[in-house]
Amino acid sequence: MHKPGDVVLGGLFEVHYTSVFTERTFTSEPQQPSCKGFDTLGFRDTMTMAFAIDEINNNSNLLPNVTLGYSLYDNCGALVIGFSGALSLASGREEQFLLQQNCLGTPPVLGIVGDSYSTFSIATSSVLGLYKMPIVSYFATCSCLSDRQQFPSFFRTIPSDAFQVRAMIQILKHFGWTWVGLLISDDDYGHHVAQSFQSDLAQSGGGCLAYLEVLPWDSDPNELKRIVHLIKTSAARVVMVFAQKIHLIQLMDEVVRQNVIGRQWIASEAWTAAAVLQTPRLMPYLSGTLGIAIRQGEIPGLREFLLRIHPDQNDNNNFGNDMVRQFWEYTFQCIFAPPPAGWVEAGGALCTGQEDLENLETEFFDLSNLRPEYNVYKAVYALAHALDDMLQCEPGRGPFSGHSCATLQRLEPWQLLHYLQKVNFTTSIGDQVSFDENGDALPVYDIMNWQWLPDGRTKVQKVGVVKRSAFKLEELTIDEDKIFWNFESNKPPRSVCSESCPPGTRMARKKGEPVCCFDCIPCSEGKISNMTDSTECTTCPEDFWPSPQQDHCVPKKTEFLSYYEPLGVCLTTASLLGTFICLVVLGIFTYHRNTPMVRANNSELSFLLLVSLKLCFLCSLLFIGRPRLWTCQLRHAAFGISFVLSVSCILVKTMVVLAVFKASKPGGGASLKWFGAVQQRGIVMVLISIQAAICTAWLVSSSPAPHKNTQYHNDKIVYECVVGSTIGFAVLLGYIGLLAILSFLLAFLARNLPDNFNEAKLITFSMLIFCAVWVAFVPAYVNSPGKYADAVEVFAILASSFGLLVALFGPKCYIILLRPERNTKKAIMSRGTTKS
């Protein structure tokens, strides 16, 4: 089919789908093949190109003052015919070439729209690509055609199989299908898809193949039976099929025989719209099928153009081709005269040319679902826009050598190829058309759903779109409310090898199986996983611990001797009570300071001892509450100095008692001069100064500090004060113990002095309690963890302080308050004299 013009575009279409070749012999000349089986939809594709060129010629904004023509060839569904047609388009169809002397003039065609099959396009592009002839296919999808090294001049307006595979993976990820079966046809289409699918699926991490099977060409019943049995027994509920509809017909016959239900079928573009499969026999199995289809478009005015088709040679609208007559005969089931012999006798009708196309109801005029035609329409416009851009070039600013431009009088295909690579326009329905560096247009697919209506009819419903934007971002849009699911739940099926591992567990691969098959192992102690399907568990930060579900980290419980817990409340109460008792005793002694009982027991040292005991009670409060740097540093210093002060006072009191007793003997008065008031204060200050020096050295060299201890409990943080220097702490305690032992020994020696009220006995008893408490304290302190070590130390402080307070001041307060008759000098002295 031809139409002249200033510039001619070629086209390759499948108007017939069967070719019959005559037998070739060595003695006979080869005959032209005969094309059989008229394909009305292929003819509609052809007429769509004729319409697009007619529309462009009537558009004053696109290619003004330039008339496009076309030269269209039928490939008859055979590679040899399609390839022959492509060579005819490129080289011209005249039998003889009459070259002009100056070799000027345009080539036969400047660009070709076609072919429909990938195999045909591979063969055509391999040859015509050598001459930089632009070829824009509307139906070839093989991803191999994106190889610019092999096919430098190939473009297409249909997405490649590579994007079709990625679109399928997007659908799988959207519904969470990670365990799927894949069926492919045994050809380049199927094997390229399988390779691309496995590669992209592994890179995306979106799932695994439960099986990969190749559908046989020869309909081997045993092989089909095996494949269908595998589908039936596999745990994969989703089956993807990349094959032609002829394979599906054979496969579904076996599916019906084995009654394989409960499977979600995913259709490739090749059979998404196959009406031959949408039958009442197969719909119980195939209803709910999801598939991807070529983008549906609208072509305004196409119907009116198709209605102008007429076989009358004298009609101005005639396309001047025998193809129109064949279309007419096929559509109205008639034949033009002269009819073959016996045609009329057999009841065949003769075509009159007056038949009415207007009221004819055939799929040829059903323009509600234009898909390949829309790609043809875009391909023609892409060539036209590239030509328009080329002819608008300003001389001296062109892209060719010497900044030259192409001219209408001398156009070359390679010049159009340059502009076709850069073409960018928008169709009437808003679709953007441009080509990437591989010649692929911006891909877009419609997502279709096979729906079985209650009245038995079948409807293929558009439920979404998947496309790639100019920024190479893949976008999937699905309206799930429109989808019909062929399951009792009317919901998407689950298709996984192993159920997802919940947070708190990790995936453990099953040996020898795909990555989608795994076991869920709980995280080990101290680790969490906060996402579904975690491959590993992570350790919580130091101050955190896993929740009971091990799905998130929670702050560890902090443990220290608190003022608010029962143990802390009891110890605080005891400390304050001891302080209060000291104040009461101090008040009693102050009030009765002139009585013999107070004066006879060295009142100054007694007052100092009461103050030191009060400090001992108060210093225990530093061991309660959250440890801080200043409390850690102060607690042991205050404890050490307070107790040294107490024990020093007791030691001096004991020494004074011994000195007084010695002075009462003849010649012993000289000993009292060493134990006057000044000397007593001096001894106490010296003893305290030694302890203060020990504490200072300790704090300067290795100061105690707060520490978060996680060794006792994994799920708790024990706040404690580390002593810093164990030697410093031992010297501090050892010095207190030395003074206490010395006081005990001196008091023990003076326990039988002849006084009615012998204070040495009280000191002996108090030192005995003091030493017993602190001897028991050391092992208890070492073996007590965390806050209990502080509690043991506080208990030791309080026990020893109460022991000193009660043993030394209890009997005195008893006499002062309850037995005042004994609080006289005579009473104190007389009983002692009588006794001696």
Image: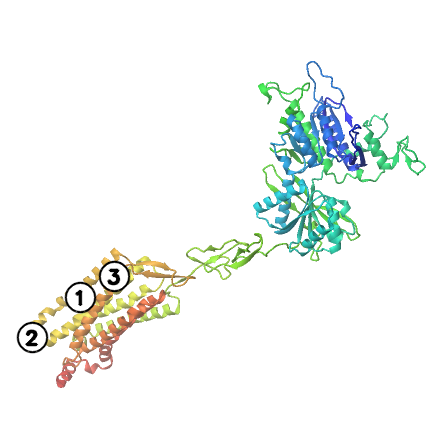
Q: Amino acid at mark 3?
A: Ile
Residue 633, placed above or below residue 664: above
Spatial CA span between label 3 and label 2: 43 Å
Mark 1 and mark 3: span between their CA atoms? 24 Å
Q: Point out residue 829 in the picture as x, y percentages from the top left corner.
A: 14, 81
Image quarter hosting the N terminus: top right
- In the picture of the structure, the residue carrying the numbered disc 2 is 668
Residue on which the image places disc 1: 684
Q: Real-space Cα distance between discs 2 and 1?
A: 24 Å
Which callout, 3 or 2, points at the residue further toward the start of the chain? 2
Which quadrant holds the C terminus? bottom left
Crowding at label 2, few (<14), some or many (≥20) Cα neighbours within 10 Å? few
Q: Considering the numbered disc 3 on the image, is that residue within a helix, a strand or a loop?
A: helix
Say which amino acid is labelled 1: Val
* Residue 586 against residue 39 in the figure, above or below: below
Within 10 Å of disc 3 (Cα), the crowding (few <14, some 14-19, many 20+) is few
Q: Select label 1 or label 3 by which is in front.
A: 3
In this rendered view, identify the residue nearer to me: 692 or 439: 439
The circle drawn on residue 653 is none
Q: Which mark is residue 727?
A: 3
Q: Secondary structure at mark 1?
A: helix
Whichever of labels 2 and 1 marks the residue nearer the N terminus, that label is 2
